[in-house]
Structures are given as C-alpha cells and as structure tokens.
Amino acid sequence: MDNANPKESESLELFSQTVANDGDICHVLSQDNRQIANDQNEKRRELELKTLAIQGNLAAYLREFLDRIDDVKSSHDRLELDNQFLQDYIGNLSKVLDRKQSS
C-alpha cells in the first residue's frame, strides 16, 4: 500500500472513521431507544396504578351513593306510611265530627 494515492488513503481513513462513528451513533440510538422504552413502560405502569386507584375510589363512591339511595328510599317509605296513617286519622276525626254535628 506504499504506492497508494494519499487522497485514497485519506478517503479510506475518513470512511473508516465515519463507519466507526455511525456504529457509535447506532449504539447511542439503541441505548436511547431502550431508555425511551423503559420510560414508556414506567409511565404506563404509573398510569395503570393511578387508574386502579381512581377505579377503587369510584367504586367506593358508588357504594356510598347506592347506600344513600337505599336510606332515602327507606325514609320515603316510612314517611309515606306515616302520611297514610295521618290521612286515615284525619279522615276518621272528620267523620266523628260530622256525626257529632249531625246529632
């Protein structure tokens, strides 16, 4: 290679450096891709945990809400019975008063 053209040697060395640099770049890009994938997996896991926490809270709120609905229904039924009792009582008193006034 003593009779090689200096320009060819320079070009060959530049090419070798470029290939080496490209290999380094590929290695760096590969590491970056792995880091991005790891970051994405970590973020996905965080979102999954937050989602599970929100679902748990939502389930608890829903149970509370349904319990409250049951309480209101029970209260309504009790008040409805009380109202019916009072209506019957007032109706009976009215009949008694009408009889007394008629007599």
Image: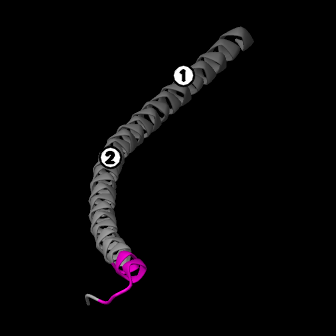
Compared to residue 30, the image places residue 5 above or below, namely: below
Label 1 Cα neighbours within 10 Å, binned few <14 / some 14-19 / many ≥20:
few
Provide the residue designation for mark 1.
86
Residue depicted at 26% across the width and 59% down the height? 38
Locate residue 41 relative to residue 58 in the image: left or right. Answer: left
The amino acid type found where label 2 is placed reads Lys
- Helix, strand or loop at label 1? It is helix
Provide the residue designation for mark 2.
50
* Stretch in magenta: 3-12
Where residue 67 appears, as percent x and y from the top left, is 36, 39
Compared to residue 3, the image places residue 12 above or below, namely: above
**Residue 2 lies in quadrant:** bottom left
- Asked whether residue 7 is drawn in magenta, I would say yes
Locate residue 61 relative to residue 95 in the image: left or right. Answer: left
Nearer-N-terminus badge (2/1): 2
Compared to residue 76, the image places residue 40 above or below, namely: below
Residue depicted at 41% across the width and 38% down the height? 65
